[in-house]
Image (cartoon, rainbow, N blue to C red):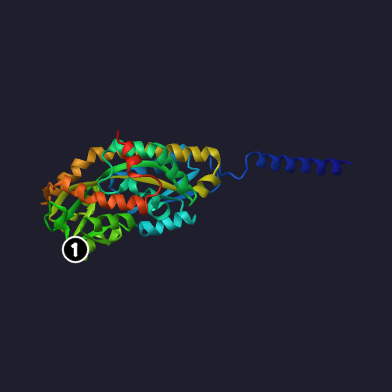
Amino acid sequence: MKKTRLTVGALLLVLSLVLAGCAGGGNGQGNTDTGSKAPVKIDLATIYDAKAPPTMGAAKFKELVEQRSNGAIKVNLFTNGALGSEKDTFNALSGNELQMILGGIQGVDQFAPQYMFITAPYLIKSWDHLRAILEGDLGQKMIQDLDKKNVHMLAVNYRGIRNTTSNKAFKKPDELKGLKLRLPEVASWVAAWKGLGAMPTPVALPELYGALQTKVVDASEGPYEQLATFKLYEVQKYIVQTQHVYEPCWLYISKSFLDSLPKEQQEIITSSAKEAMLYADQLAQEKAQEFLKELTDHGMQEIQPDLAAFQAAAKPMLDDMFKSTWTATTYDEVMQYSK
């Protein structure tokens, strides 16, 4: 009899331990206290330099997410094209082989080219104009169409105004003839600059310095932070203030990956992304003139081109692109957002 009581007691003890373990368990993915569970891993890739304001915003995102999740989410940030070209990483994101990207318009060009007007040279008039588009119906439709390709825009950073560097001084579009201009692998940008008279040459950003150094290309374009962080003052003479694009970039995430996470973790990621990109906006505004000064302090000369001439030269190209490619809207509708 005593032996039977002992056996029952032992069984009850084992059962209580099992139940206790179950009570503290679950699959752990949505738990903010990781315990012995492996954290959710996010690989975040960017071609931008570590010192660029958008990348510093991505670093802030990493800090916020890991802090707010109590370590349940781990973000690995890869800068300077460590995981490949922007085109390659967007393909990986769409295929759910990569969790996140900090990147520019490349994703739109690959998966929703009908919205590429948002970075068309000489179309957007101001930051307020761009913001109105992105926050309005057109911007929401763009997000929805990209979601269908598993490319979700979490939050936007207003990165900077793109200008041109060159070893040839120019002030008017007709002086661009024969100029080999490095561009990102963005089809509509290539078409736009070809229409302005240049010879566009797509080169991945991590290869930009070498392409200029070896004279594969003669010129480049981008925001001041890109020109400075890639030390283009070592291989270029002039900064031509073409002011052709008001450039946004985004924190993108694989939609299927985001949807697979518990609501609590989705909210942490989404709120942290918005806060981090606002931080990047502030840095971009503060540092733009610092980057320009760095370029001129190293000997680059500023040139003020005839912007009216460039705008006039771009208009036929814009009209053609709205007819053939940017079919999500019309020129007139886009201009309504500038009022």
For label 1, the crowd category at 10 Å Cα-Cα, with few meaning under 14, some 14 to 19 and many 20 or more, is: some
Q: Amino acid at mark 1?
A: Gln
User: Would you say residue 105 is visible in this rendering?
Assistant: no
Residue behind mark 1: 213
Pick whichever, 150 or 55, lies toward us: 150
- The residue depicted at 15 percent of the width and 44 percent of the height is 293
Q: Horizontal placement of 269 versus 311: left or right?
A: right
Classify the position of the C terminus by image quarter: top left
Residue 171 location, x and y as percent? 12, 51
Classify the position of the N terminus by image quarter: top right
- The residue depicted at 23 percent of the width and 41 percent of the height is 287
User: Would you say residue 204 is visible in this rendering?
Assistant: yes
Residue 124 location, x and y as percent? 28, 42
Q: Horizontal placement of 86 versus 265: left or right?
A: left
As helix, strand or loop, the secondary structure at mark 1 comes to helix
Q: How many marks?
A: 1
